[in-house]
Image (tube, rainbow, N blue to C red):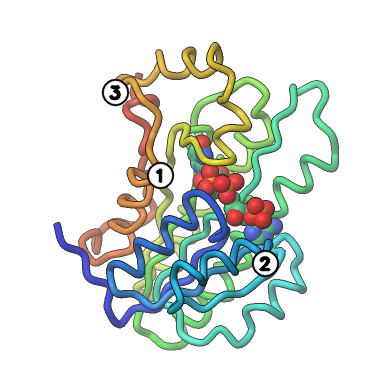
């Protein structure tokens, strides 16, 4: 299936590493113009070396005012990928206020805020748009030491449904992608221990973790007109984990 996004302008958060970085490259390959947003300048510098045509914005999206300032003159955006997040793993009884606040600030509050800014522009222009929010299998299944991460991703799934409900009349589609483990920097935090990894693998019917490409292909599909009638849904990229 060929997907052409020529003429579209896309914004990706958390574009410095992992899934976000690969999404930037896939969007470019589909012909979109891309704005890459993340908080580490050196990641943007190396990304520009690989992809000279992109626009970059360095901002800590967990800071409300910094986000307003960074995105106020962003111009037209047709496609938004809310990908930036952290995974701070702690046993439930030892969870700290700092980790809880940090997790909700970026995983949920920043997603809502960036979406507000971008969706207001989409609504004003009246040409619609598509938003993909990165959730996780952890939104729907309890994982040890993941209490706050699971809670943020559960919030992402419900936030997405309400966004779909309220933005649908403006022809803006909103969906989540819910991956299983992907061995990015974030994936390695939780799943580098072979004993832990094999426990998770044994619960995935397809018997492997997701590759970055598996997730990126799904994001691109949900951004494209090939999914024109899909909104408000959570699409697992989990090899069947949530079905088992
Ligand atoms: P990653 O490799 O850790 O990359 C996350 C990116 O987000 C980094 O570039 C990071 O920048 C950026 N970011 C974090 N906090 C930020 C902030 N406050 N402001 C701006 N940028 C910020 O993660 P990933 O594995 O690619 O994950 C991408 C998405 O997929 C996340 O939403 C994650 O929850 C979800 N997901 C991942 C997995 C997995 O196993 N990897 C599974 C399911 C879902 P810095 O490095 O500079 O902080």
Residue 211's place in the image compared with 30, above or below, is above
Residue 117's place in the image compared with 215, above or below, is below
Does any atom of ligand 1 lie closer than 8 Å to the CB of label 2?
A: no
Say which element carries label 1.
helix
Give the percent coordinates (x, y) of residue 61.
Answer: 68, 64
Say which element carries label 2.
helix
Distance from disc 2 to disc 1, alpha carbons, whole Å, reads 22 Å
Distance from disc 2 to disc 3, alpha carbons, whole Å, reads 37 Å
Residue 41's disc number: 2
Side of 238 where 206 appears, left or right: left
Residue under the image location 43 percent in, 38 percent down: 179
| Residue 158 seen | no
Q: Is label 1 or label 3 in front?
A: 1
Check disc 3 and report the residue beneath it: 206
Residue 20's place in the image compared with 117, above or below, is above
Residue, far left: 1
Say which element carries label 3.
loop
Give the percent coordinates (x, y) of residue 76.
Answer: 46, 85
| Relative depth, front residue between 89 and 92 | 89
Does any atom of ligand 1 lie closer than 8 Å to the CB of label 3?
A: no
Check disc 1 and report the residue beneath it: 212
Distance from disc 1 to disc 3, alpha carbons, whole Å, reads 16 Å
Q: Please tell me which of labels 2 and 3 falls first in the chain.
A: 2
Q: Please tell me which of labels 1 and 3 falls first in the chain.
A: 3
Locate the C terminus by quadrant. top left
Crowdedness of circle 2 by 10 Å Cα count: few (<14), some, many (20+)?
Answer: some
Side of 174 where 2 appears, left or right: left
Q: Is label 2 or label 1 in front?
A: 2
Residue, far front: 49
Locate the N terminus by quadrant. bottom left
Crowdedness of circle 3 by 10 Å Cα count: few (<14), some, many (20+)?
Answer: few
Crowdedness of circle 1 by 10 Å Cα count: few (<14), some, many (20+)?
Answer: some
């Amino acid at each position: 299936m060929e997907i052409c996004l020529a003429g579209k302008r896309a914004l990706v958060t958390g574009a410095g590493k992992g899934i976000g970085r690969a999404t930037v490259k896939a969007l470019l390959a589909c012909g979109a113009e891309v704005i890459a947003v993340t908080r580490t300048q050196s990641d943007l510098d190396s990304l520009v070396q690989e992809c000279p045509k992109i626009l970059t914005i360095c901002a800590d999206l967990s800071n409300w005012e910094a986000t307003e300032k960074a995105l106020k003159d962003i111009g037209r955006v047709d496609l938004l990928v809310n990908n930036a997040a952290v995974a701070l793993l702690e046993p439930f009884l030892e969870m700290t206020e700092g980790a809880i606040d940090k997790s909700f600030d970026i995983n949920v509050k920043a997603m809502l805020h960036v979406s507000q800014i971008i969706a207001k522009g989409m609504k004003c222009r009246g040409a619609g748009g598509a938003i993909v929010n990165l959730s996780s299998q952890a939104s729907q299944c309890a994982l040890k030491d993941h209490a706050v991460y699971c809670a943020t991703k559960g919030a992402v799934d419900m936030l997405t449904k309400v966004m779909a409900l309220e933005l649908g009349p403006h022809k803006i589609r909103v969906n989540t992608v819910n991956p299983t483990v992907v061995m990015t920097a974030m994936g390695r935090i939780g799943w580098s221990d072979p004993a832990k990894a094999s426990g998770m693998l044994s619960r995935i019917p397809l018997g492997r973790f997701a590759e970055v490409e598996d997730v990126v292909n799904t994001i691109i599909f949900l951004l494209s007109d090939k999914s024109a009638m899909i909104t408000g849904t959570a699409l697992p990229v989990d090899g069947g984990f949530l079905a088992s």
